[in-house]
Image (spheres, grey):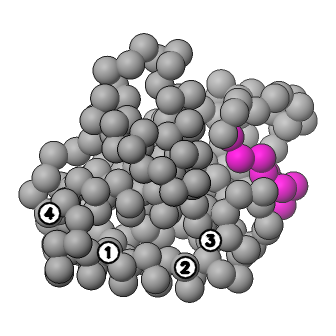
Amino acid sequence: MRASLEEESLEDGQTPLDPDEAAGLLPRWVSSRADLNAAENANIQSSYGWASAELARGASVASDGFLRGLHAAMFGQVWAWAGRYRATERNIGVAPHQITTQLHHLFADTATWREFDSYTLEEQAMRLHHRLTWIHPFPNGNGRVSRLMADYYLEQQGGVRFTWGAGLPTSLARPAYLGAIRAADAGHLLELQRFVRQ
């Protein structure tokens, strides 16, 4: 990653990259956080076609293959490690050696929720999203990929995508989202339930 980019401060909730992960930056023109955001946003826009094709062929959203494939489709033009689980410790998320086990448990739980109607469809999607952010499987892009996973899960089951705080002013949406995630981490899901439909 360019030196000027590494020196820029991160917003609350952004994940710092270790030097090896930062070296995986593909576009040579990226020299600022604004450049990186633009590159990632363009890549994310191009990922929608991949997801639509996967859904059309009947791929299971709540699966390791869909998660990795979606992350690769969202960030593969920006990061060399897109679609690969992290191998480094973070101050959030499970230890790297626990990622695949925790994801296996999550996808098994999701199948059980669906089979036995343990929760409403919306709560299933919200819990899928939250657990993915808690596991934090990738070096970066975890919030974005987990929100799309929840939306595609809803879509696959005939539901309506979440609004993700779209009714809030832009300046309040990110703090509200992070607050809701942190409350959910502590076992309180009500804020997140409200936020996904705000």
Q: What mark, if any, has residue 85 been given in the picture?
A: 3
Q: Residue 5 location in percent, x, y?
A: 81, 33
Element at label 3: loop
Vertical placement of residue 154 versus 167, above or below: below
- Mark sitting on residue 110: 1
**Residue at position x 50%, y 19% in the image:** 172
User: Extreme left residue here?
Assistant: 158
Cα separation between marks 4 and 2? 23 Å
- N-term mark: 2 or 1: 2
| C-beta proximity under 8 Å, tags 4 and 2 | no
Mark 2 / mark 3, whichever is N-terminal: 3
**Rendered-image quadrant of the C terminus:** top left
In contact (CB < 8 Å): disc 4 and disc 3: no
Residue in the foreground of this view, choosing between 180 and 98? 180
Quarter assignment of residue 157: bottom left
Question: Which sits earlier in the primary sequence, circle 1 or circle 4?
Answer: 1
Spot occupied by residue 144 in the image (x, y as percentages of width and height): 48, 47
Q: Earlier in the sequence, mark 3 or mark 1?
A: 3
The residue mark sitting in front, 3 or 1, is 1
- Mark 3 and mark 1: Cα distance apart in space: 20 Å
Residue range of the region highlighted in magenta in the rendering: 14-22
Q: For residue 11, which numbered disc appears in the image?
A: none
Residue matched to label 4: 157
The tag on residue 102 is 2
Foreground disc of the pair 4, 3 = 4
Q: Earlier in the sequence, mark 4 or mark 3?
A: 3
What's the amino acid at mark 2?
Gln
| Residue 129 seen from this side | yes
Q: In which quarter of the view is residue 82 placed?
A: bottom right
